[in-house]
Image (cartoon, rainbow, N blue to C red):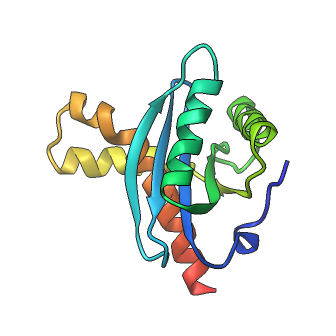
Amino acid sequence: MPEVSLHDLPKTGALMGVDPGTKTLGVAVSDATRLIASPLETIPRGKKLRPALDRLFALYDERRCVGIVCGLPLNMDGTSGPRTQAVRGLVYNLCQVRDLPVAFRDERLSTAGVERLLIDADQTRKRRGEVVDKMAAAWILQSAIDQLAEG
């Protein structure tokens, strides 16, 4: 699997952020200059993974991305658990279909942070459910591009 460190991703070009869930994949993309991450789409995961991966690859190509930053759900103490292994398995399967550079990013508080923002913005529970995954992907990706900008 071509897992790379954040700093080993290609130096220029758009990046894709992925918030992998058990039922959906939240997707975000950066602009080519890597200033801002924008939520893009929530891809449903059915019984078969391939249709979700095909949609992910289509978005990757449409946006001319050069790498992926994937959220990694570590436990609060920083250790790996079953969800961490499931995400690593997802990325393994993704890389079996297509060889892409993938960097993992700690996502421990991304969904909780996005939920708080949406509640503060007075969004309904239904609306929060519709956008939280793609916004969490943007949160993960923005933290990565901020770190890259800091050097």
Q: Is residue 58 above or below residue 66?
A: above
Q: Position of residue 96 (x, y in %)?
A: 81, 37
Judge from the rendering whether residue 90 lies leftward or rightward of residue 18; answer left or right: right
Please tell me which residue is depicted at 71% across the width and 34% down the height of the picture. Answer: 90
- Most extreme residue toward the right, as rendered? 1
In front of the other: 66 or 105: 66
- Most extreme residue toward the bottom, as rendered? 151
- Most extreme residue toward the left, as rendered? 122
Please tell me which residue is depicted at 66% across the width and 79% down the height of the picture. Answer: 11
Q: Quadrant of the C terminus?
A: bottom right
Q: Position of residue 20 (x, y in %)?
A: 57, 38
Please tell me which residue is depicted at 65% across the width and 26% down the height of the picture. Answer: 50
Judge from the rendering whether residue 4 lies leftward or rightward of residue 128; answer left or right: right
Q: Is residue 39 above or below residue 128?
A: below
Q: Is residue 51 above or below residue 122?
A: above
Say whether residue 81 is visible.
Answer: yes
Q: Position of residue 112 (x, y in %)?
A: 42, 45
Q: Position of residue 106 (x, y in %)?
A: 63, 54
In front of the other: 112 or 61: 61
Q: Is residue 44 above or below residue 131?
A: above
Please tell me which residue is depicted at 72% across the width and 74% down the height of the picture. Answer: 7
Q: How many marks?
A: 0
Say whether residue 139 is visible.
Answer: no
